[in-house]
Structure formats: C-alpha cells, structure tokens
Amino acid sequence: MNSQTEQIYQGVLKRDPDEKEFQQAVYTFLLSVDKIIDELPDVTYHKVLERMVEPERVIMFRVPWTNDEGKLEINRGFRVEMSSALGPYKGGLRFHPSVNLSIMKFLAFEQVFKNCLTGLPMGGGKGGSDFNPKGKSDLEVMRFCQSFMTELQRHIGEDTDVPAGDIGVGGREIGFLFGQYKRIQNKFVGVLTGKGLDWGGSQIRPEATGYGLVYLSDAILEDRKMTLEGKTCLVSGSGNVAQYTVEKLLDLGAKVVTLSDSSGMIYDENGIDREKLKYIMVLKNVQRGRIKEYAEKYKGVTYIPRNPSEPNPIWNIKADYAFPCATQNEILKEDALNLVRNGIKLVGEGANMPCSQEAEAILTSSGVLLAPAKAANAGGVAVSGLEMSQNSQRVQWTREKVDSELKNIMHNIYKNISEAAETYSTKDNFIDGANIASFIRVARAMIAQGYV
C-alpha cells in the first residue's frame, strides 16, 4: 500500500483494535483501491476514502424478551448504517450467536459496494442480534422479534433504511418484524424486504442470492468457453443460499455432491437430485433438522462431523467448481491448497467473505477463477431492490419478469467488474474489479454531495 492507504488502514486498526472481520474487509478493499488511487484525476478521492471506512451511524441496543418458561432473556441488537451516498441504507438482519459489532461492520461495509454493483439506488447497512432462533419455539421467536423491532423501528423507514433477512432471519422472522413495525408506526409500507407474497413481497426473493451466484458464475465460465453442464460442484451450507444455488445448478445441468451445516457435511457421490433437494428444504426450513439426517435417509451417503481444528473436509473432494455458501472465513489456507490440488477451476462466493485473505491469494495465484462475494452474492439485494420498486408502485411483478431482471443485473455486474479488472488490474482479477468499480461510483456520489 502507498502511504495514504496505509495510513487509513492503520487508523482503522487503532480505532477498532478488536474488530478482526472488519479489519479484514477494509484491508482487502484498500489493497484493490491502492492500485488506482494515485492515478485518479481528483485528489478528493483520497478524502472520501477515509470516510468510507467509518460508518455514518452505529446503533446498539438491548433486546429484552420472555421465554416460554416466563424467564426474562436479554440479547444485544445492532444496526450499522454504513453509507447512504447512493440511496437508503439497505442490508440484512442476522440472528446468530456469533453476531458482534465487528461482524456487523464488516457486513455493512461489504454491503455498500455490493449494492453499488447492482446499479440500483441503494446505500449499505447491516444489523442483527446475538439471539439464536435455533431450538426456540415460534412464540419465543415472535416475542424476541417484537422486542427487537420495538427499538429498531425508530431508526428505519422506507426512505431511510430498509432491512431484509440474513442468517437466522427467514420468512417467519420477517413476518413478525413487519407486523410489529406496522403496529407501532400505523403504516403499511415497504420498510422490510423478503416479505410474503400475500403482503408485499416479490417473486424469487428467497431464491435470489443462490440464483444470482449461479448466473454470475455461469457468465464468467461462458466468457471462457466453459460450462456448468455435466460438471461436479461442491456447495457448502444448507440454508437458503445453498438450497437455491443447488436448484439453479441443477437447472443448468451440473451435479452437486456436498452440503453442510455447523455440525458436519454430507458427500453424496450419486449427486443431490431434485427429490433429495426437496427433502433438504423440508428438513432445514420446516423441521429445522441437521444435515446428518440426510445421510441417515439415503444410502451411499457419507457424513463427516465438523472438526474446527482441522481443514474443512468439504473442500478436499475432487470437483470442478466450488460454491461456499455457509459463512465468513470458511475457506482457510489449507482448504484453498486442497481445492487447488484437486483441480478446482472456479470458486463462486455465495457467503459474505467466505475466503480468508491467504486463501484468496492462493486461489487467484493458482489460476482459479474467483467470483468475489460482493459481486457473486449480490442477487439477493438486487431482488430486494426490485421489491422496493414494486412496493413503491403498489404492484407485484411476475416471476418471469423478476427472474429476467435478476439475470440482467448479474450479467451487468460481470460486465462492470471484468472491465474494471482489465482496465485497472489484471484480466481475471475480479476482486480488484469489484472493489474498484464500486469504489469509483460511491466516491463520485460522496464528492458530489460534499464528502458526507
């Protein structure tokens, strides 16, 4: 890094010494921007860069709720409103025990540039709580969501900040949150996305992140005369993103052999077909079961428990393409070496920042095509933006129209990041392409608005 970007990064380390995830996201971003910052004609780009790494607003609050035994529970709630340069803050809510300020800031920071790449008028934010919905009754989840929204509602609005779902926040949680907002504000507006189709939601919103990941990956492959058809794919996770990644991969003729959750992974050498995928959707979305139950149901399936102290076995299986869709930093140095050793040709990041810095460096230097998260998993927020448009118009588009719009957005994202990579970095460095293309657009908006 040059002295200016290095100074900005050192400032982040000094102000936020314990926020490792946020530091990682900023460092990766600055590495890309460092390649062009001194070549830009306007010196004010340096001034906005140091503002980009500081949130416009951080909200933290307690969330008291009562469990089914009548005992008072306390969790912590967050909303990080990172940037409104391009539009209202937009980004998901995550309910998971791992949630802390560092993770919220890293996700909000990434969201700014991800939303920018869609071309839609959205800023970036992220929020959530260390509440764990797993093992909770519907009534407990409802009481928590109502308490969470009682505080959050004073900070959001359809023209201010529009949250959505993320890990631990699906249709059930969005319904409870929206109901409480409507009850307090006495308004039926598009303040949340990911709503049910009967009350303001959009077609293809649940599928959007997984579908978008595959659309972008397919565009990268197609440009190199490669294809998904007949190829073996590794997919991690088993939640919303993973499920619909598998569905779209099947649509395009690929074979998926793995899925996982926090307890372990399954390897199905015969491939996860549509019937098996339907079972997984019921298992995870309705029964809220564990992935090992898949191995108990189907013959010839291997289940491997997860050992956090060892390399993840899912990334040590021979395949053509890999799609990490679970969580941040799930592919570390040894995992990346295993992927390269086994001949992986493309990694499409479905989760947010699923590869560590070391892993990304190993993959890209080894010639693996890497579709970075801020581009590859932008499909979810893209359709959230389309849901906002539908809410403003008081209309609901057809499934075909939304899917067509999503595909066009993902292909435009590929066009923009590939052109930026070729212009400012190297041809296949989509990490630089995504960071640089989005930086320039956000920076231009901030300069025009007085650096705010």
Image (cartoon, helix red, strand yellow):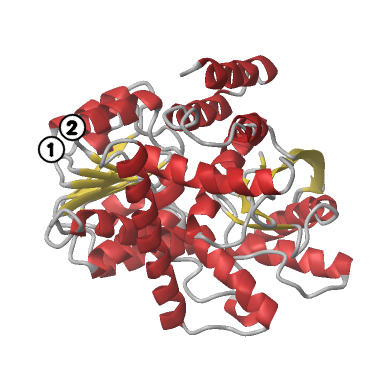
Question: Is residue 203 found left or right of 224 in the rendered image?
Answer: right
Q: Label 2, secondary structure: give it.
A: helix
Which residue carries the number 1 mark?
343
The answer to whether one can see residue 98 in this image is: no
Question: Is residue 364 found left or right of 2 in the rendered image?
Answer: left
| Quadrant hosting residue 58 | top right
The residue nearer to you, when weighing 298 against 42, is: 42
Q: Residue at x 63, y 32 (%)?
A: 53
Q: Position of residue 33 (x, y in %)?
A: 47, 32
Q: Position of residue 403 (x, y in %)?
A: 41, 74
**Amino acid bearing label 1:** Gly
Q: Position of residue 369 (x, y in %)?
A: 24, 42
Q: Residue at x 80, y 48 (%)?
A: 66
Q: Is residue 286 above or below residue 317?
A: below
Kindly check if marks 2 and 1 are in contact, taking CB atoms under 8 A apart as contact.
yes
Q: Is residue 276 above or below residue 2?
A: below
Q: Residue at x 15, y 45 (%)?
A: 319
The answer to whether one can see residue 80 in this image is: yes
| Quadrant hosting residue 399 | bottom left
Q: Label 1, secondary structure: give it.
A: loop
Q: Position of residue 5 (x, y in %)?
A: 54, 22
Q: In the displayed image of the protein, which residue is found farthest to the front?
A: 41
Question: Is residue 182 found left or right of 165 in the rendered image?
Answer: right
| Quadrant hosting residue 394 | bottom right
Binning the other alpha carbons within 10 Å of mark 2 as few (below 14), some (14 to 19) or many (20 upward) gives: many
The residue nearer to you, when weighing 220 against 347, is: 220
Q: Is residue 72 above or below residue 376?
A: above
**Amino acid bearing label 2:** Val
Placement of the C terminus among the 4 image quadrants: top right
Mark 2–mark 1 distance (CA, rounded to whole Å): 5 Å
Binning the other alpha carbons within 10 Å of mark 1 as few (below 14), some (14 to 19) or many (20 upward) gives: some
As drawn, the label of residue 340 is 2
